[in-house]
Image (cartoon, rainbow, N blue to C red):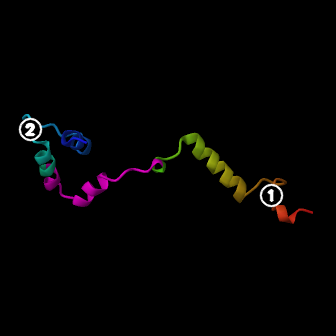
Amino acid sequence: MYPQTFTRRRWPLFRPIARTKDWFSTFSALVESSFCLTCICQMAEVIPADYFPLPLRERRLVHDLRLLVEDPPPGKEHTGIGRQL
């Protein structure tokens, strides 16, 4: 990955005033000027796919299923396979 692309991904709001010839030094200067180096390291981590919340429909279905398991309606209680008859 090129330093210019890398810099723009990390700092999307950064717009240099003058034309930049050395993007590596620009990136280094931005890192050094950051007050939280831990945050810079965490920005480099890949975000897992399951980080984003479920869509509203899936959340509602999971919630309804959980309610049915915890407090089933009368006559709809489930029994284990080993306890039949």
Q: In the image, which residues are magenta?
A: 30-49
Q: Which secondary structure dominates the residues rendered in magenta?
A: helix
Q: Which residue is mark 2?
A: 21
Q: Which residue is mark 1?
A: 78
Disc 1 crowd rating (10 Å Cα; few below 14, some 14-19, many 20+) is: few
Residue displayed at 15% across by 37% down: 15
Task: Name, please, the residue furthest toward the left.
Answer: 18
Q: Secondary structure at mark 2?
A: loop
Residue displayed at 89% across by 62% down: 84
Task: From the top left corner, tell me how far across and down residue 42 is, in percent.
Answer: 31, 56
Query: 64 or 40: nearer the eye?
Result: 40
Query: 55 or 70: nearer the eye?
Result: 55
Q: Is residue 68 left or right of residue 29?
A: right
Q: Is residue 57 left or right of residue 15?
A: right
Is residue 45 highlighted in magenta? yes
Q: CA distance from mark 2 to mark 1?
A: 70 Å
Task: From the top left corner, tell me how far across and down residue 85 is, in percent.
Answer: 93, 63
Is residue 46 highlighted in magenta? yes
